[in-house]
């Protein structure tokens, strides 16, 4: 299985209680259709239908034994499924077709006015975090801001600048000095010498400890 559609087809083949019972029986030993029908408690035509679904995804194969067909389980596809679902690098690709930005866009459309300012803060924490991340984009990486300078940046979004500053720090988006006088983004220092001050040109200006 190399595509998401293949995975869906395989899981659909297993998404039936009788088919799972048949897989369990075949995992114990090969069976004929009649044997499976008696064990599962359904008619032979129904078992044949289930076997067709399982054969289509490679889980079951048949061999002739005189006038009968004997069905056996091939566990390799199940092992492959388990390997793929447990692989950390594979699982994220299941969401390749999803619109991962849809939730953020919906929140911003609801809570940001035409002037770019927040009309309100959502009650739900996940929605409120969308606004916090949106405001963070206006904070320049590698720059140290005084509280007044940071407030000037944040006021374009909301007059409640203290709420946004606290959210930045509480969620690790920004750091600040112990006295709360200076703020800078946690993810992007200006250089190895430390963040530079607002308006300080290209030279580094170490933030006081």
Image (tube, rainbow, N blue to C red):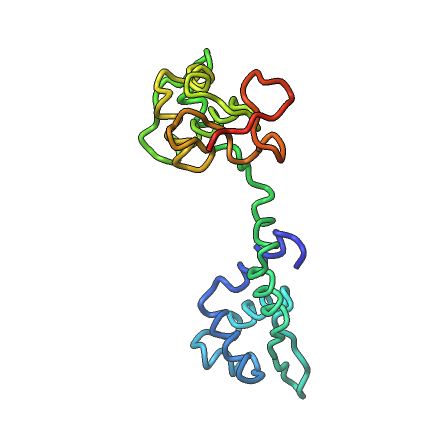
Judge whether 171 appears above or below 67 on screen.
above
Query: Residue at 58% across / 18% down in the picture?
Result: 200
Most foreground residue, 18 or 45:
18
Give the number of callouts: 0
Q: Is residue 31 above or below residue 16?
A: below
Front residue of this view, candidates 199 and 69: 199
Residue at 54% x, 29% y is: 206
Relative to residue 95, is residue 170 drawn left or right?
left
**Viewer-nearest residue: 137 or 53:** 137
State which quarter of the image contains the N terminus.
bottom right
x, y percent for residue 53: 58, 65
Q: Position of residue 204 (x, y in %)?
A: 60, 26
Where residue 34 sits: x, y (%)? 53, 81
Is residue 65 found left or right of 107 in the rendered image? Answer: right
| Residue 71 vertical placement versus 106 (above, below) | below
Q: Position of residue 21 (x, y in %)?
A: 47, 74
């Amino acid at each position: 299985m190399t595509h998401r559609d293949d995975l869906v087809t395989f899981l659909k083949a297993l998404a039936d209680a009788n088919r799972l019972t048949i897989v369990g029986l075949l995992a114990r030993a090969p069976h004929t259709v009649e044997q499976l029908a008696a064990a599962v408690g359904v008619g032979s035509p129904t078992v044949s239908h289930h076997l067709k679904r399982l054969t289509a995804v490679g889980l079951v194969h048949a061999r002739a034994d005189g006038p009968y067909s004997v069905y056996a389980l091939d566990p390799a596809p199940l092992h492959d499924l388990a390997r793929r679902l447990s692989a950390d690098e594979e699982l994220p690709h299941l969401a390749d077709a999803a619109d991962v930005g849809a939730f953020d866009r919906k929140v911003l459309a609801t809570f940001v006015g035409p002037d770019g300012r927040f009309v309100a803060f959502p009650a739900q924490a996940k929605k409120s975090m969308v606004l916090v991340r949106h405001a963070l984009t206006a904070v320049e990486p590698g720059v140290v801001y005084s509280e007044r300078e940071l407030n000037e940046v944040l006021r374009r979004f909301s007059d409640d600048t203290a709420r946004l500053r606290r959210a930045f720090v509480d969620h690790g988006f920004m750091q600040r000095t112990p006295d709360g006088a200076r703020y800078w983004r946690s993810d992007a220092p200006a250089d190895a010498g430390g963040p530079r001050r607002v308006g300080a040109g290209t030279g580094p200006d170490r933030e006081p400890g």
